[in-house]
Amino acid sequence: MPHRALVTKELAEFLGVLSHPNRIRIVEELRDGEHDVNSLLADHGLSSSDVSAWVAHPGGPRVLEAFERGLHLQRSDLEASWRSLDAVGNLSSSSVLHVLADMLDQPVGTHGVLFALGPGVTSEYVLLRWAA
């Protein structure tokens, strides 16, 4: 059974999402490779072509390039992550939140995947949906 996000309200408050016109709902959160991204999407009747907001941890050029190769993404799919890396570098754990804050203005119904790396080469994927 996937780990369910328990910090939705706290995350939303941190990012100022509660006062934002498009709220983000965390649909499901996976930790430590329980499933790959395609399985996560398939569990919700989605495929990578349904995702238009890719929120990647900008841990460095090699990290972003590996995400692009592994997920078959174009550089433009991770543009916000590349911008964040260029502007502020790798902010460690908070990097992915910096990228998400830059991507808040998405149409209602947009699906996104937020993903990051952690200590010991762990990974975490979060399926997002922008809601009214």
Image (cartoon, grey):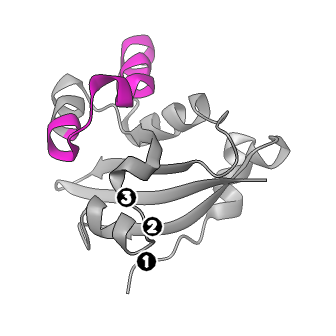
Residue at horizontal 27%, vertical 57%?
123
Amino acid at the residue labelled 1:
His
Question: Is the C-beta separation of discs 3 and 2 under 8 Å?
Answer: yes
- Displayed quadrant of residue 2: bottom left
Task: Please give the range of residues in magenta.
Answer: 67-90
Write down the residue under mark 2: 29
Mark found first going from the N terminus, 3 or 1:
1
Mark found first going from the N terminus, 3 or 2:
2
Write down the residue under mark 1: 3
Amino acid at the residue labelled 3:
Tyr
Label 3, secondary structure: give it: strand
Q: Specify the label residue 72 is tagged with.
A: none
Residue at horizontal 68%, vertical 58%?
10
Q: Does residue 88 belong to the magenta stretch? A: yes
Residue 109 lies, in percent from the top left, at 64, 52
Can residue 111 be seen? yes
Amino acid at the residue labelled 2:
Glu
Q: Residue furthest bottom?
A: 1
Q: Does residue 7 belong to the magenta stretch? A: no
